Image (spheres, rainbow, N blue to C red):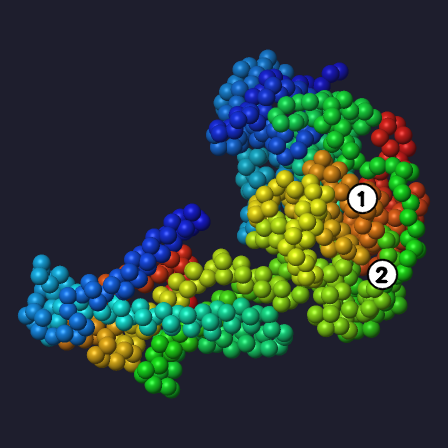
Amino acid sequence: MTARRLIEIGDLRVTQPGMPLPVLDRFSLTLNAGETVVLLGDAHSGKDAVLRLLDGVPDAGEEFTARIGFNGAEAKQISRGLQPPFRVAYLPAAASQPLHPRFSAASQLTHIVARRLECPSGAAQAEFRAALTHLSGAPCFELLDCPPQRLDDISLSWALLAAASAAAPELLLCDHPFLNISPSAARMLTDALLAEQKRLGFAILYAARGPQSVMRLDARTLVLRQGRIVEENDAADLVSGQTHAYTQALFKALPQHVADKPKRSSVRGEPLLQVQGLGLNTPLRKPVRTKDALSFELRRGASLALVGEEGSGRHALMRAVLGLDRKPGRILFDAVDLSLLSQTMTARLRRRVAFITSNDDALDLRMTLWDTVDEPLRAHLQLSRDLTAGYREAALKRVGLASHDGRRTVASLSPFDRRRLMVARAIVSAPLLVVVDEPLRGLDAVAQTTMRDLLVDFRAEQQAAFLVITGDFAVAQALADDAMVFKDGRVVERGQIRALLTNPKDPATKALVEAAAIRPLSRGAAPV
Amino acid sequence: MNGLFRRALAAVGWSGLGLTALVVVLSDFLARAQAGAIHIGPALSPPSSRFLFGTDMLGRDMLSETLHALNATVVSAVPAALLAIATGALFGFVGARFPEPARFVLRWAMGVFASIPALLLAILLIGLTARGYAVAAAGLAVSPLAFVRAFDRARESTNSAHSEYARATGIAASALLKRDLAYEVRDSLLSTAARAFAAVTIILSTVSFLGFGAVPPHRDLGLTIAAAKPVYLEAWWTAAFPALVLLLIILLARLAAGLDEGERA
């Protein structure tokens, strides 16, 4: 029996006043009841316009023409007032802060459910509570009765999923729903989404930036670029081979094989960073219990990934290493205990530390592009203007920012450019240690690939030690040789990443490895 | 209020203040009579084509008197505002980087001073020094508010992600201070100056009105308004025009400051 055709869209064209190109052009889509379709593309590919249109909230001034048919009816030419004759729910990303920051998340989501179901608030709350209990990882209703800012992104994602599911939709529009969430959490949420789809039978239209979502959903995928479909295929076929160059670029973001990666010994060189008896969960002046004490060392040119979920302790360790928080225990950099030095001496030693983070506010937004790169040179070295400009230009060229106007402020740069600027700043610092914190988070697939390649090249050329903080084993694998897996403030497993990937022992490591979906890009091949 | 509207208001404010500065510079030229010159016309003559602002009970031309008073007010307010910026805003900006507990004690003490109305503080300081120090008293009275504001902004900056990032990569505290100060001067020196100017103008005029400020025969706007007290109900123009000018320059200064917490320093 063939499934009922829920939506048929043909020749959809969306334009916005003042835009030289249409937002969407000649876009066609058929979606059956209970089916999943992924719209894959970068931020300006036009996939958001499809979601907006079907949710009935086009942008101001946005105009469209299309042939559209619902529920198997013949498609008709429509240019206004698109209202699907079935219930549609919308699942946004928690990271996009979709709720009002002041009011209770529970009451706002109840209100959304009530509006979708067109029922009284009490009945909507009962539906929402029931949906929360259906989802095993979701927090209870009472825990959601607080402003959304107090909830972490994972809890809020569960709540948003429950609210969408409670609306009992026939079509669920997923707008990058698990963006900036660790792979294992995203995997759990995706599994829950698919389970809800199976239970309730709704169709899913899923907008995604990266191919990881395609692999998780294993669904028919439309690849969009600048408002046009450039490729359409099933996930398995797309993973095994891409026709269009843009799709190939997108799929490069997927984890690569480890076989051809240059092997480096983690025990080469002198110790650069030594952590001795550090207590991540111990108050500053209390003695650290033996079982809580964390010790490790990172040698010159070596690399180590700190892998774990949010709140597992890897960030606390990173902040202690960077000198931003004090913890009981000793941290030695280049055989010097930084806690014993004056601020001036500490700053002198720390100049050999570079930091690349996914926090887009880490760079001073008021500074210009040139000033941001020059600052480490000016602060630490007495160089002539010409020499400073030479180093700066070389670094900007390496990261692909040389063509940007150097007087632009950081505030005017995109997140990807800001991250590349951090790499340029790191390059001129000639660091001994590079601390990299979730470097690919929040970037489009193509930007992820570029950023990953940039960091791999940087590491190869600079010969600096890398300390990589991530929740994604795929990132860890690309940038480091060894890893320590964190859970609840403790290291549960450590060793070479290859060994951890092939033979994880701790359940936390297993979950992270499975979530990373590290597998060869060929159909039916076993995961690495 | 959106940024564009605020910038437009600030442009109006600065243009008005520029015009005021021009009037102050040319006040001797624009005024038909010297400061304090009596019997220029009949006593208490209402505004007319001959005396645009009328005359007071000693036959002084109120237009000339208002221009001279405006000059005296602005000439006193500028150094007082500079003092408020130096002892308040600048000190607050640097003080926010002092180590604990000095930073905490400083913020707490200045918070206490800032909670006292600046006018009362100015009167207290004048009482402890002398009448001739009204300018310094006004500047110092306003400085706790300027301090608290600058301190809190600086703390926000030092606790920000970009400061952490800089510290983590070895940028020294002094370099960070220089960087923040440069951007603070570029981004908010003008609005801070305008805000301080409005605050000290109000204080200087009020203390003069109360008799603790300007010393006759040099009359500022506050003292000129005070001199009209005995006849104000019969001859409104003797106080209304100086008051209107005072109101105008305070409004312009607050517009120049972006109407952001206008009454604060």
Instruction: Locate the N terminus of chain A and report the quarter of the image it occupies.
Output: top right
Q: Position of residue A298 (x, y in %)?
A: 86, 58
Instruction: Locate the C terminus of chain A and report the quarter of the image it occupies.
Output: top right
Left or right: where B177 falls relative to B7 = right
Q: Is residue B241 above or below residue B229?
A: above
Left or right: where A275 falls relative to A130 = right
Q: Position of residue A93 (x, y in %)?
A: 65, 41
Task: Give the structural element (helix, strand or loop) at label 2.
Answer: strand
Q: Name the quadrant containing residue A323.
A: bottom right
Q: Name the quadrant containing residue A55.
A: top right
Residue A222: mark in rendering: none
Q: Which residue is label 1 attached to?
A: A456
Left or right: where A96 falls relative to B61 = right
Cα–Cα span, label 1 and label 2? 20 Å
Q: Residue at x 84, y 61 (%)?
A: A273
Task: Give the structural element (helix, strand or loop) at label 1.
Answer: helix
Q: Which residue is label 2 attached to?
A: A272
What amino acid does circle 1 point to? Answer: Val
Q: Residue at x 57, y 35 (%)?
A: A116
